[in-house]
Structures are given as structure tokens and as C-alpha cells.
Image (cartoon, rainbow, N blue to C red):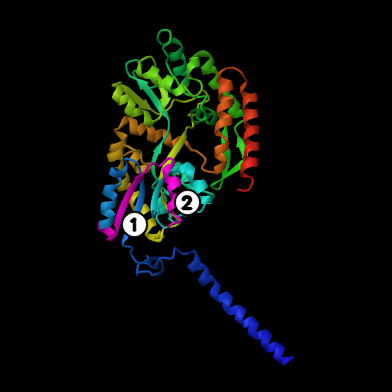
Amino acid sequence: MKKWLSVLFIAFLTVGLLAACAPEREEEANSSGSENEGTTSEDGMPEKPEKLVIWEDNEKGVGLEPAIASFEEEHGIKVEFKELDMSDKMREQLRLDGPAGKGPDVLTLPHDQIGQLAIEGLISPLEFDSSVTDIYTDASISAQTYDGKLYGLPKATETPVFIYNKEHMEEAPETFEELFEFSKEFGEEKEYGYLALWDNFYFGNAVIAGYGGYVFDKTDGKYNPQDLGLNNEGAVEGAAYIQKWYEEVFPSGIVGESGGSAKDGLFQEGKVASMMDGPWAFQTLNEAGIDYGVAPLPKLPNGEYPETFVGVKGWHVSAQSENKKWAEELVKWIANEENAKIRFEETNEIPPVKSLIEDPVIADNEKARAVAVQSERATPMPNIPEMSEVWEPMAQALQLVATGKSEPEKALNEATETIKSQIELNHSGN
């Protein structure tokens, strides 16, 4: 009996020792495997790596180079960057190169890709205190947050604004009611006071959200894909207002896939006084030689501003980086106020940094200020995978509304049911 107890005691002791060692082994398993991450200096940072690698968007490296130079001088770490198409190539390449150990330490992404890449374990949550995050607009930080965790620092923001031809309109109207009356009286046949692609949900949501509709409810930084507000009372009212413009102002040719090119062509021909479009349109208008102005969107009849979708590009840390702490330090550096300002001056991409909105570099730039102000009134596109189920049903609903083939409430109810079904079918495991 005593011998059996001794054996049992030794067994318990062995298990205890193994359990005590387990957290250490787990920590080693979860680490990148880099010697740099395992050795810390006096300031608490790991030993410096020889090099860090950034993946930057195509033709945007010119805005990154000054930040890299100052980081290298400050920290003595070599930084290289590679340009890739951000919209799809970056994500695809990360899935291949990251696990193979050939990926970046830091990369840039549009915020609506964050949720899926976080689920796949390809980007890492970041740990920054409020002294770092408070310099950015609330919407831009919200866009960089998924499931309550911060996954990036904001780099640039874009959202639709009000663009007007100064030959036809001296200044932007304060309200859509003014604009509606102007549009009813403007020009000759096949000339239009205002055009917008409101049958496209990316643009049409601005009106729906301005009246109180929403895609997914968000609480404590987390979207609830089971709580849709796309057919609530406000959403229906917004869709009815959209229908009014299509019935009385907009031409039938700007509905559907060809609507964008039709709108752009009419504006460039001088047959449109104003339109809703984004900063991506500026270069084409410049090349066309049009004297145009840019402003935030006017107020809706309910007294609220349209709540456009805002897209936020951010800086992120690859989950496969062997130097995550230094990658975080690099993200913080290239996204700070000073480097954000330099980046704007080099690329014209609008930084969502609060102080820069009033800085003369943006405040005295009509186009930049309009985008910055509208971005503050905007809402980030939801960055959860379930958002992929929203676009097509809502586009179909708005096209039915725009063409008068369905009443707003019926169209939105049907779209909402389709979205719910698709979410249940394709994302029930999330």
C-alpha cells in the first residue's frame, strides 16, 4: 500500500512539473520563433532586427519614403518596401507568402478586409494606448477594429462628396431641398442639376443611413450580423426619398452597371451641374479641364447629413512577422501626425488625423477639407465577412425602387430576408 502511494505521489509530482512548464512551452509555440523576439533590451523592446519589410499600395511609396528614412535614423533598423495592388493582390499574396516566411512585417489594407484576414489569422491585434489612438478620428479607429480588437492604425480615408461645376453653380447648396428645386429648373433637355448613383448601395446607403437605417447594429465595437436595420422605418423613408429623385430628376440611363459611365460622361460634357462622387474622380476631372468645386454633402430634408460609407486604409502587422514588437513600432511611426502630413503632401490621400483637418495643408485645400469633413460624418463600411452578403440584394432592391417597379418597403423587406438567409447559409460558423 505504501509503495502504491509513493508511486501515485511521484506521478502527481511529475504532472505538476509538466503543467508548470506548459505555459512556457505554449508561449514559445505562440512566438514567432525569432531570437529577436525572445531577447529584450533595457527599454523592454526585443533586440533590434536587421531589417523590416513593408508592403505598400501601388504608386504610393513616394509618401512612405520620408517616414522610412526618419525611422531608420531614429532606430538604426533597415526598412524596405514593396508595392503591390492593395485591393486584391496584397491579400492573396499574404495568404501565400506569410505562412511561407516570405511575407512582410507591415502591410497596408482597406479596412473592409480586416475581419476576414483576422479570422484567417493573417494579421495581428495591436496594443496601443489612447495616447496613440486618440489622434485619429473615431470613425477611422472604429474601421480598424474587429471583434473589439484594434488591428491597424489609420493611413488614409476616402468617402463620396458633393462635386459641382462652377460654370453652372457658384457654390454648393446647404440642403438637398435647395438642390432639388435647382435641379427641377436647371438647363435644357438632357441637362441635369444633380446626379448620383443611388441605385448602387455604396452611394445609396448615405441617404438610407441619413434617415436612420443601418446595415448591422454595433455594440461595444462589435457588429451583430443578426441585427439588420436595412428595412426599418428610417430606411424605408430614405428609399422613398431616393425614389423621388429618380421619378422627378434623374434620367433612366444612370441605373445599373452602365450608370457610372453615363453620369461621368454627362458631367464631363458640361451637361450636369453637380454630382455625388469620391476623390478618385478628381484626377479625371482635372484632366478634362473642368472648373469644379468640392464640398461635403448637403443636409437631407430631415435635417440630418447623409451618412456616407467611409473607406479607411490602414497599416497592419502580419501575424507571421518574426519581429512583431518592432513592426508595431514601425506602424506607430509611419502613421503618426508628422508622417501623415508628409504623406498627404506627396500622395493627396486624406489622413484621418484630427489635428490635420484644421491644419492649413488640408483646411486651405478645398477638396481635401471636403473629404475630411464628410469623413467625420460618415460611417465605416462594416469589416465583417457577412458584409459580402449585403451588396447584391441591396443593389437589386434599390434598382427596383429607382425604376418604380417596387415600393420601397416591399423591396427592402425582400432584400433583408435574402441577406439574412445568405448569412445563415454562408456564415453560420462565424
On the rendered image, what quadrant is the N terminus found in?
Answer: bottom right
Residue 272: x and y in percent read 39, 16
Identify the disc placed on residue 384: none
**Which span of residues is magenta-colored?**
73-100
Looking at the image, residue 371 lies above or below residue 343: above
Nearer the observer, 104 or 304: 104
The residue lying furthest to the bottom in this view is: 2
Q: Is residue 273 visible?
A: no
Which image quadrant for residue 159?
A: top left
Amino acid carrying mark 1 in the image? Leu
Q: Viewed as shown, does residue 210 lie left or right of 312?
A: right
Looking at the image, residue 420 lies above or below residue 235: below
For mark 1, what is the residue? 52
Q: Is residue 218 visible?
A: yes
Q: Alpha-carbon neighbours of circle 1 within 10 Å: few (<14), some, or many (≥20)?
A: many
Nearer the observer, 41 or 121: 121
Nearer the observer, 142 or 106: 106
Q: Alpha-carbon neighbours of circle 2 within 10 Å: few (<14), some, or many (≥20)?
A: many
Amino acid carrying mark 2 in the image? Leu
**Mark 1 vs mark 2: which is more N-terminal?**
1
Q: Are marks 1 and 2 in contact (CB under 8 Å)?
A: no
Residue 265: x and y in percent read 39, 19
The kind of secondary structure element at disc 1 is strand
Which image quadrant for residue 360?
A: top left
- Please give the name of the residue rendered at 39% of the width and 61% of the height, measured from the top-left corner: 323
Which image quadrant for residue 385?
A: top right
Residue 317: x and y in percent read 42, 53
In the image, residue 208 lies in the stretch drawn in magenta:
no
The residue lying furthest to the top in this view is: 188
Residue 392: x and y in percent read 56, 31
Identify the disc placed on residue 150: 2
The kind of secondary structure element at disc 2 is strand
